[in-house]
Image (cartoon, rainbow, N blue to C red):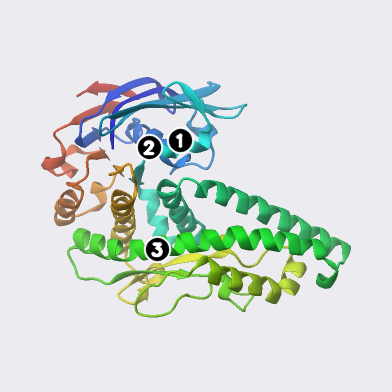
């Protein structure tokens, strides 16, 4: 998959921007705050329907404007696609493919990218919610229909929590709350499908992350992943993702059938605690992806450099999984301000690790930070303008 052209209107600090892209490496150079990250952020939005920097779409609309437009031409083999999205302040966003209207949530079907940015250090050091989002965004790129499953699960969860709050306020006991069982069924059906999908994805990521970490760091560290499933926890007071499952030397995915049995049992087991707290205490919304380095939890054990390399390995592994499993082939790999954090040897190793991808987009504040092999197609950015190519 290749991006051949990007057009922006009123996006971030760009009134307008027109940028052509080449196969292979494309480097965007500019001082901090000039707009180079804004370019790659717009492409990342097309494949995830979100920003790696802000929580709301409104922040990406240029100040004083009512909307922003991202328009890109994508090539996959002999197929050419014009993908467009309009972000609106006061109405729903709108999307088009080849000038025909589509649902905005279907955009990721047409464009696949993997973006790594400094914010991704939180994948290693941050809260479980970020790691869940990492898995779910990758799942949608691999299997777009799962976006609907995730949305339906969130709606069911919201309804169930609302019912728990009403029951607590009314002093209703669990045995009297037959309506809750209806939402239990819905939650288990959707949640077990999501748990299985995440579990199978983790099984695919395990060898890819291990290989990517060695490729970046040049050291034989044991980088491993585990799934922690709240449905197997018996302790309602524990932190999210309290129980690691399955346990063993090799990660074995859990099936939807087994997940459904465990999920239903956990809802029964935790019913009293849920009524007391008015919140659903188990399910995929409380699971975690555990990252281990040399047998220790990376979140508390890894140094800054190791955490940075682990986060980068997660993204490179994601790109490798997409390359193998997605019908669209190689995703566009985006490296936002990565090389400044790496020493000379790791810069060279990273350049070698990404060399095989069809297209790599790179941003950097200093040209000399990027290995020369990646600088053939360089674009200079200054104050939201393309000043040199």
Where, by quadrant of the figure, is residue 79 drawn?
top left
Residue 219 is left or right of residue 6, and the answer is: left
Spatial distance from mark 1 to mark 3, Cα to Cα?
A: 24 Å
Provide the residue designation for mark 1.
107
**Secondary-structure class at tag 3:** helix
Quadrant where the image shows the C terminus: top left
Q: Is residue 338 visible?
A: yes
Q: Is residue 336 visible?
A: no
The crowd level at tag 1 (other Cα within 10 Å; few <14, some 14-19, many 20+) is many
Q: Are marks 1 and 3 in contact (CB under 8 Å)?
A: no
Spatial distance from mark 2 to mark 3, Cα to Cα?
A: 22 Å
* Disc with the residue nearer the chain's start (2 vs 3): 2
The crowd level at tag 3 (other Cα within 10 Å; few <14, some 14-19, many 20+) is many
Farthest-out residue, left:
372
Spatial distance from mark 2 to mark 1, Cα to Cα?
A: 7 Å
Provide the residue designation for mark 2.
111
Residue at the spot 11% in from the left edge and 41% down from the top edge: 372
Q: Toward the viewer: 162 or 17? A: 162
Q: Are marks 2 and 1 in contact (CB under 8 Å)?
A: yes
Residue at the spot 54% in from the left edge and 72% down from the top edge: 258
* Disc with the residue nearer the chain's start (1 vs 3): 1
Provide the residue designation for mark 3.
202
Could you say where residue 280 lies in the image, as x and y percent from the top left? 67, 64
Q: Are marks 2 and 3 in contact (CB under 8 Å)?
A: no
Could you say where residue 254 lies in the image, as x and y percent from the top left? 47, 70
Could you say where residue 173 lies in the image, as x and y percent from the top left? 84, 71
Residue at the spot 70% in from the left edge and 63% down from the top edge: 184
Where, by quadrant of the figure, is residue 380 drawn?
top left
């Amino acid at each position: 998959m290749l991006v051949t052209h990007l057009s922006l209107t009123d996006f971030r600090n760009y009134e307008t921007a027109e940028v052509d892209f080449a196969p292979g490496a494309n480097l965007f150079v500019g001082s901090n705050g000039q707009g180079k990250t804004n370019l790659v952020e717009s492409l990342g939005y097309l494949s995830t329907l979100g920003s790696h920097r802000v929580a709301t779409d409104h922040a990406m609309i240029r100040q004083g404007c009512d909307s922003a437009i991202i328009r890109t031409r994508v090539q996959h083999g002999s197929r050419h696609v014009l993908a467009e999205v309009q972000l609106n302040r006061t109405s729903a966003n709108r999307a088009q493919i080849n000038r025909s209207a589509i649902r905005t949530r279907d955009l990721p079907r047409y464009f696949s990218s993997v973006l790594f940015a400094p914010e991704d250090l939180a994948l290693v050091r941050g809260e479980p919610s970020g790691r869940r989002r990492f898995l779910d965004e990758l799942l949608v790129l691999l299997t777009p229909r799962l976006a609907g499953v995730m949305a339906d699960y969130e709606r069911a969860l919201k309804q169930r929590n609302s019912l728990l709050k009403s029951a607590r306020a009314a002093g209703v006991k669990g045995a009297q709350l037959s309506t809750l069982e209806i939402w239990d069924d819905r939650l288990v059906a959707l949640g077990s499908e999501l748990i299985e999908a995440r579990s199978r994805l983790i099984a695919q990521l395990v060898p890819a992350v291990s290989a990517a970490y060695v490729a970046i760091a040049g050291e034989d560290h044991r980088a491993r992943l585990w799934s922690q499933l709240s449905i197997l926890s018996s302790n309602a007071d524990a932190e999210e993702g309290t129980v690691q499952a399955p346990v063993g030397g090799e990660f074995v995915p859990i099936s939807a059938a087994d997940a459904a049995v465990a999920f239903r049992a956990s809802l029964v087991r935790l019913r009293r605690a849920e009524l007391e707290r008015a919140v659903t205490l188990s399910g995929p919304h409380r699971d975690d992806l555990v990252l281990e380095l040399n047998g220790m939890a990376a979140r508390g054990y890894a140094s800054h450099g190791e955490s940075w390399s682990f986060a980068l390995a997660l993204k490179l592994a994601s790109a490798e999984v997409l390359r193998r499993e997605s019908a669209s082939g190689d995703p566009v790999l985006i490296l936002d301000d990565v090389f400044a954090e790496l020493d000379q040897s790791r810069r060279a190793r990273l350049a070698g690790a990404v060399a095989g991808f069809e297209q790599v987009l790179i941003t950097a504040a200093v040209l000399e930070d990027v290995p020369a092999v990646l600088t053939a197609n360089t674009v200079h950015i200054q104050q939201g303008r393309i000043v040199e190519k």
